[in-house]
Image (cartoon, grey):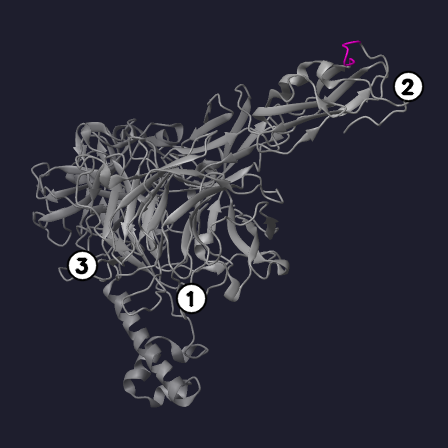
Amino acid sequence: MGSPRPVRKNGGKLISAGRQCQVVGPGLEGGVCGVASVIQIRCRTSGDAPVTMGGDIVNVSITPVGGNTTHAHVIDNTDGSYTATYLPTVASPNCKVLIQINGTHVVGSPFSAQVTPGPTNALVSSVYGRGLYDGVAGQPCTFTIMTKDTYRNRCTLPGDQFSVTIKPIHSLLPELQTFLRKYELKPHLEDNEDGTHSVTFTPEYAGFYVVDVTLGSQPVGDAPFMVCVSNPYVAFPPTLQFTPLVGDATHAPPEEASCPPSRDMVQVLDRVLVLKSESLERTGGRPQREYVHAYKLKSVMARGNEKWRRALIRSQLPSVAPPPYRRVCLALPTKILALCHADTDGDQTQITEARTLDVSDPDADPVAGWTMLQLEGKAPKALDGYAVAMWEGKGIVLMSGGQIAGGATVSDVWMLSLPGTGSTTAVWRCLAEWPSSVFSGEGMGERRNHSMTFRPGCDKDGKPHAQFWIFGGRGSDDELLNTLFVFDMEEQAWSQPSVVGDAPEPREHHAACFVAERYLAIYGGFNETGDVLDSMAVYDIFTAEWSTVTGMAARAQHRLYERGGTLYAMGGVDASKQTASSIPLSAPMNLFSQQACLDFEGNSAQAVIIKPSPSLQELRKTWTVECIFYPRMRSQSPGFQPLIVKSDGGLKTGFGLVTSWLPTPALKFPTGRITPLAPESVPPEPGPWVMFFVGGMSLPTMVGGKLELHAWNHVAATYDGAKLRIYINGAAPVESESSEPLACIPTVDFPADAPMTDEMAETFHTKGDVCIGGIKDKLAFDGKIDLCRLWDVVRTEDEIKANMNTTYSHPITQHLLGQWTFNEGSGETVVDSGGARNHGSFERYAGGVELRRVMSDRGTIAPYKSAAERYIEEQYDKLHAWKKKFHADNGRAPGMADMMLAGPEIAGVARRLGEFGMEFHGFKEEKPQTPAPEPEPEPE
């Protein structure tokens, strides 16, 4: 603004000459955003005489290059001098300060100036990165803090002291909930000295974590954030249920025919963004304005307040229109990247423009307009059908395949290097033009309408991946494909992953994303007959197996994202090939099975060690030990393979469970105690056995049973101070007939003339470690162990049978000294989830072989049933089937008379099952339980 025109004593003539005026002050050189800059002006006449009165027209302003002008406030000091003050709000190294006196520039005007950002404002700074939403246990999670001043200018100076705290709040495994609440996680914070800060943390346990970022006492950006950390062995479910995003849809993208295509839908930061052009009547219906519809994604644990918002994009549509205007949008850390085509008169063209839209400010309305990128290098020839993916963390876009002019399908791979800070130049490069020695292996071949997916994360050594996974599409011979290829930029090689079993149905126009950095999920698409698929094909990169997931809506030409433990499907067409709803679909992933086991490879250098504790040292005269395991025994060599033992290194004292391939020279058979059915000495049946010993590996204090290899077994053993008992899959048969599937010895009496005394307890009870899977440098187990438990009481047969598949999650379970489930996710700590805090540890690479946690596939172990129990169930099933048929034929439940009239067989069964002695409830009655009781309730 300028000063008002004064009335001068000399008739109102303005005598100040702009060219002669003097200007000084720091405002000539610019300033700092949010800090007032001052310029002093001293007027002089054309004859260079000082002016002693006010009233001149003084205009002062500052304009950043490409920005809006800020006018200064000018004070007339009435003595021929003026004070101009402006408040810069836009940081720029290239600004112009304009000073005019009575319409004439002063000497040097416009002056070159520089405006730097103001101090960091936590509330408008932003935090972004995958590590704020998703993670895998044992893998580094990263995110970035971008500092901004009050006017949302990027700060570039170092020195801000941010505080980052990461706290677990909920475990994905109930038995680890208590332990996880006390788990401390320390992030690594690095000042990049350019206004950004990099944060890295490595969670070891699956669960939900709260990440809080503060500056002083103020939260930064949208902090706090909710991170969903999965276990690396998470199991993909057989079905998925997608549902529309909930919340206020007042400003959701339009539906039906005007619904935007999926290529205009992206996921940036914690928002789903949908671009939509809308026409204005004054321009004859031609699209002239564009809006961005945003939906802020909540954590899967959040509730309420979800809603859409709409903001105008400040600039007009790109110049590549007139319609049809076609583009493909990709998500950058804080921006949308659009690769644009200038199609005219129905003819498709190659990519002609690339531009970015800054969406880092979630509350901006209007949104700052598109920024045009200057493209250099030869552009790709593909017109359509190509696949694109971002190389996260590198600012690089890869584009593969597609269809060029003339209809030919190509196999080219192109790379677009995006500009860094302060630049707008992006460079195309065709990787086929690189030296042939750079990329080895056979490439993907010609294809179009395929998917290309970037796999995030790191390998076991912490080295970042740079892999692009390519699946499906249509080849140059018009054949639909189902082949899978990997393009590794770090290794500079093509490869084709191995496949165990059958590959999924060939398809095109599908969507793909990675889940937990392990599963490549391929959703929907068109099959050979043109039908829209309603299933998901999932490739496990660890096992090389394909699986099929059903129960979802049919979709094609859509997009698929994973964030914070949830899958999101956007846009596309439905089963009728009509435009699908613009409201994205979501399916939670955090409820998937996260069970693991330890895979022991028979390496004697490895074992889980639980050090002695007061509670373990109190084990004297009674105990119960349990183990769920999968024996392999590939060598079938004699000797013992420990499951869980508390013993010295030579198994001469203590107790525990071991497996062995019998006969073995380590065991002598002087008596017939190994089988109570034979009074004379009879060696055990050859094969794999599990044995429970007390006081050392000698027959008078041992009991054993035959095992099934390559199958999950539950074994429990008890000692009450006088007797040893072993239960295999909940069974302790009195007899050991050859027709029984289990050949085991249920009970062995301790020598009657030597009952357990305190002195003997000292002998039989060792003060050594509890070892799982081996005794370090001496003995090793070959197989998988899923669970171990240790109690200081004798568990009854009913308790063992009822709870053999139970995992105790209560923080205090009476008499439970240790429960080890191996579900931690990563690291070398084995958590005692029973609440006694008897945690263990192991060396992951001891002996040069990795001791791995792998996904457990044990399912529910069926309790062993005796011949009598099996007979009762057969009789019940027979009667139940008859009742169901009677009800279907007669429209009513049968009564006692009906059962008696049905014949002697049904009447006999009903009588034996007590049907005639209790009230009858019809065929919908619950199946009676076997004699085993209900699982015992956990103590409060």
In percent of width and height, residue 4 lies at 84, 27
In percent of width and height, residue 270 lies at 51, 44
Q: Which residue is mark 1?
A: 574
Range drawn in magenta: 44-49
CB contact under 8 Å: marks 1 and 3 = no
Find residue 10 and name its label: 2
- Of badges 3 and 2, nearer the viewer stands 2
Q: Magenta includes 808?
A: no
Q: Main secondary structure of the magenta part?
A: loop
Quarter of the image for residue 315 reads top right
Label 2, residues with CA under 10 Å away: few <14, some 14-19, many ≥20? few
Front-most of residues 719 and 540: 540
Three-letter code, disc 2: Asn
Front-most of residues 74 and 446: 74
- Judged from the image, the secondary structure of the residue bearing numbered disc 2 is loop
Three-letter code, disc 1: Asp
Front-most of residues 824 and 42: 42
Quarter of the image for residue 720 reads top left
Residue 291 horizontal side relative to residue 843, left or right: right
